[in-house]
Structure formats: structure tokens, C-alpha cells
Image (tube, rainbow, N blue to C red):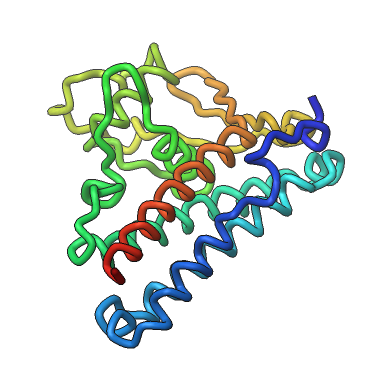
């Protein structure tokens, strides 16, 4: 289905921008809170969240033909926007968590607690970003986190990298190489990249779902933050 013809509520202009503006207004209007919460730092991070939202809107409304013709540059930009928006949320949490008694969004820089049955979709976005544009040519695989082990089992069922034994050091020859598939293989609802481990493995990513999950995550965080600030002001 053409993404332009598919218009659930989360694909419409979200209220994330208004939430950021509301939070900023509450803090800026109170001089004591400005000083206590380091206004210049939280303002820049709220602004970055809005910039990322603008990029998502541009991508959603982008003509499919234009996307397919120039897919790599749009894919690189979109995934970097996911990454920087997540980093902005991490920084906001660090600024506010002690004063506002947050239930932490992250455990030591996005080390999310995982359940046995579910993989956190925000960390999956981050993992794909690292594969495609963050570290596509060299990967340090001698230390594999529990989260990466879980994804390796899902995407690379026959790989030596999905072993639970993490004591053996792996050399450079064991590192995965990731790169985008070019040409007509990319659609806005499904891009593809591949790795060789030891045979070619194709990985599909639904960018529409990624935007949806990112927006839900961001909105939930901002609603929580807004509520906490309101309680402080009372």
C-alpha cells in the first residue's frame, strides 16, 4: 500500500512539537526552575526532538519515486534523526531524573531491560542504524551484549555470533560487514541491507513501523516529563 494513501493518526502531524513547546514554556517562565534544570541544555535537546519530527514529516510526505531514486541519502538521514532524537531524550532524562524522580527510560545509555518474549523496538532502530550508517565496515564483536545476542539469533540463526559463549575473542576476520542494497530494492515501507556471515543474509527494515515506534516512545517520554514538571510547580 502506498504510504501516502495510508493515514492512521500517528502519521498525521503529531503533538510532539506542542509538548516540547509547552515544557519549554513552563520552565522558562519560572526563573528558579530555569536555573535548577539548566535551561540552555534542556532547550537545545527539546529543539532537537522537534527537528527530528520535521524530518519524519518530510519523509512521510516524500514522493515514492523520489525516495527510490535517492534512497541511500534519505535512509542515512532518517536513521541519524532516530539516533539523535533518542540521544536528546537520554540527555533530558539525565537533566531531570534526580529532581523529578523519573522511572528511568534508560539503564546506562539505552541499555534497556528486555523481556524474554519481546525485543525493545527502540533499541532495534538503534541496532539497524549502527549496522547501516554508524559502523557498517568494522564491528567490534569480541564483546557481545545480551541484547545483541538476541538480535543475532533472530537475524543470523546460523551465525557463530549468536552463541551464548562470549568468552572466545574473535578476530577482525570474524567481524560482520553491512551495506545497503541499492537500486529498486528500497521502498519506504521496506528497505534492505545485507551482511556476509558466512553467506549473504538479507535484512529487511520497515521504515513506517520505525517512525511509528519512535514517535510513540518520544510522546510517552514527553507526557511523563510534562506531568512531572507540572507537579513540581504546584
Which residue is at 59% across, 32% downward? 209
Q: Is residue 137 visible?
A: no
The image quadrant that residue 28 belongs to is bottom left
The image quadrant that residue 217 belongs to is top left
Apparent side of residue 30 relative to residue 168 in the rendered image (left or right)? right
Apparent side of residue 51 relative to residue 150 in the rendered image (left or right)? right
Measured as percent of width and height from the top left, residue 132 is found at 53, 42
Measured as percent of width and height from the top left, residue 141 is found at 29, 36
Between residue 89 and residue 150, name the one nearer to us. Answer: 89
Vertical comparison of 8 with 92: above or below = above
Question: Which residue is most to the front?
Answer: 234
Give the total of numbered labels: 0
Between residue 63 and residue 192, name the one nearer to us. Answer: 63
- Quadrant (top left, top right, bottom left, bottom right) of the C terminus: bottom left
Which residue is at 62% across, 54% downward? 77
Q: Is residue 228 visible?
A: yes
Between residue 222 and residue 192, name the one nearer to us. Answer: 222
Between residue 138 and residue 79, name the one nearer to us. Answer: 79
Which residue is at 67% across, 38% downward? 9
Which residue is at 33% across, 87% downward? 31
Measured as percent of width and height from the top left, residue 61 is found at 78, 47
Amino acid at each position: 500500500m502506498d504510504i501516502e494513501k495510508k493515514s492512521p493518526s500517528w502519521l498525521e502531524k503529531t503533538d510532539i512539537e506542542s509538548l516540547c513547546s509547552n515544557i519549554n514554556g513552563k520552565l522558562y517562565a519560572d526563573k528558579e526552575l530555569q536555573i535548577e534544570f539548566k535551561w540552555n541544555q534542556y532547550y537545545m535537546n527539546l529543539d532537537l526532538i522537534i527537528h527530528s519530527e520535521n524530518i519524519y514529516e518530510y519523509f512521510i510526505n516524500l514522493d515514492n519515486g523520489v525516495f527510490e531514486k535517492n534512497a541511500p541519502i534519505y535512509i542515512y538521514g532518517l536513521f541519524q534523526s532516530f539516533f539523535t532524537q533518542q540521544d536528546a531524550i537520554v540527555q533530558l532524562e539525565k537533566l531531570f531524573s534526580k529532581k523529578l524522580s523519573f522511572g528511568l527510560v534508560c539503564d546506562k545509555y539505552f541499555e534497556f531491560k528486555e523481556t524474554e518474549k519481546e525485543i525493545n523496538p527502540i533499541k532495534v532502530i538503534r541496532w539497524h542504524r549502527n549496522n547501516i550508517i554508524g559502523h557498517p565496515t568494522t564491528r567490534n564483536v569480541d564483546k557481545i551484549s545480551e541484547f545483541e545476542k538476541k538480535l543475532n539469533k533472530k537475524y543470523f540463526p546460523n551465525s557463530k555470533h549468536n552463541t551464548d559463549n562470549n568468552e572466545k575473542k574473535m578476530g577482525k576476520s570474524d567481524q560482520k560487514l553491512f551495506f545497503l542494497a541499492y537500486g529498486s530494492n528500497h521502498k519506504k515501507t521496506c528497505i534492505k541491507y545485507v551482511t556476509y556471515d558466512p553467506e549473504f543474509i538479507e535484512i529487511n527494515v520497515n521504515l513506517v513501523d520505525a517512525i511509528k515506534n519512535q514517535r510513540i516512545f518520544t510522546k510517552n517520554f514527553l507526557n511523563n516529563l510534562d506531568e512531572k514538571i507540572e507537579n513540581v510547580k504546584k
